[in-house]
Image: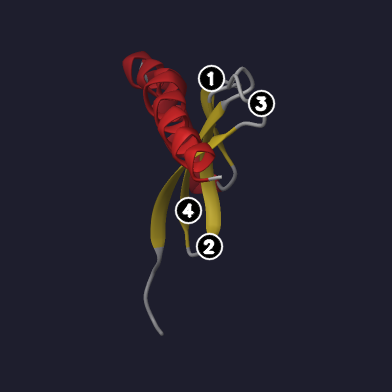
């Protein structure tokens, strides 16, 4: 079908039960191409397209916004991982 497809995705990636290696990823895509990505390990947005580089530069200038994204690994990821992991372990 004709049209445009844009979306934002947040992910929490980890492999240890104590969540010490947890990373928060936040990506913005347009028509299945990732334009920019925030990685909590890197601590800033990185652009992968011409438009994404512009967005990343603007997002990275706003230190309050970047601090919120860095904090998401604790606020969003660890909090929810503890809930999800407990629910899964209780079922087995």
Q: Earlier in the sequence, mark 3 or mark 1?
A: 3
Label 4 to label 3, Cα distance in Å? 29 Å
Asked if marks 4 and 1 touch (Cβ < 8 Å), the reply is no
Label 2 element class: loop
Label 1 element class: loop
Q: Earlier in the sequence, mark 4 or mark 3?
A: 3
Name the disc covering residue 16, or none.
3
Asked if marks 4 and 2 touch (Cβ < 8 Å), the reply is yes
Report the residue at 57% width, 48% height from top. 49
Relative side of 63 to 21, left or right: left
Task: Work out whether residue 26 can be spotted.
Answer: no
Observer-side mark, 3 or 1, equals 3
Observer-side mark, 4 or 3, equals 3
For disc 4, the neighbor class at 10 Å (few under 14, some 14 to 19, many from 20) is some
Label 3 element class: loop
The residue that mark 4 highlights is 29
Q: Is residue 76 above or below residue 74?
A: below
Report the residue at 44% width, 39% height from top. 87
Q: Is residue 90 above or below residue 29?
A: above
Report the residue at 40% width, 66% height from top. 5
Q: Going by the picture, which residue comes out furthest to the right?
A: 15
The residue that mark 1 highlights is 43
Label 4 to label 1, Cα distance in Å? 19 Å
Number of callouts in the render? 4
Q: Earlier in the sequence, mark 2 or mark 3?
A: 3
Q: Earlier in the sequence, mark 2 or mark 1?
A: 2
Question: What x and y, as percent, mark residue 70?
Answer: 45, 19
Label 3 to label 1, Cα distance in Å? 21 Å
Relative side of 25 to 65, left or right: right
The residue that mark 2 highlights is 32
Q: Earlier in the sequence, mark 4 or mark 1?
A: 4
């Amino acid at each position: 079908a004709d049209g445009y497809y844009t979306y934002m995705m947040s992910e929490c990636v980890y492999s240890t039960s104590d969540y010490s290696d947890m990373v928060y990823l936040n990506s913005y895509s347009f028509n299945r191409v990732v334009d920019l990505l925030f990685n909590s390990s890197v601590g800033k947005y990185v652009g992968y397209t011409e438009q994404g580089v512009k967005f990343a530069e603007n997002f990275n200038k706003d230190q309050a916004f970047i601090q919120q994204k860095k904090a998401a690994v604790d606020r969003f990821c660890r909090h929810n991982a503890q809930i999800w992991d407990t629910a899964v372990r209780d079922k087995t």
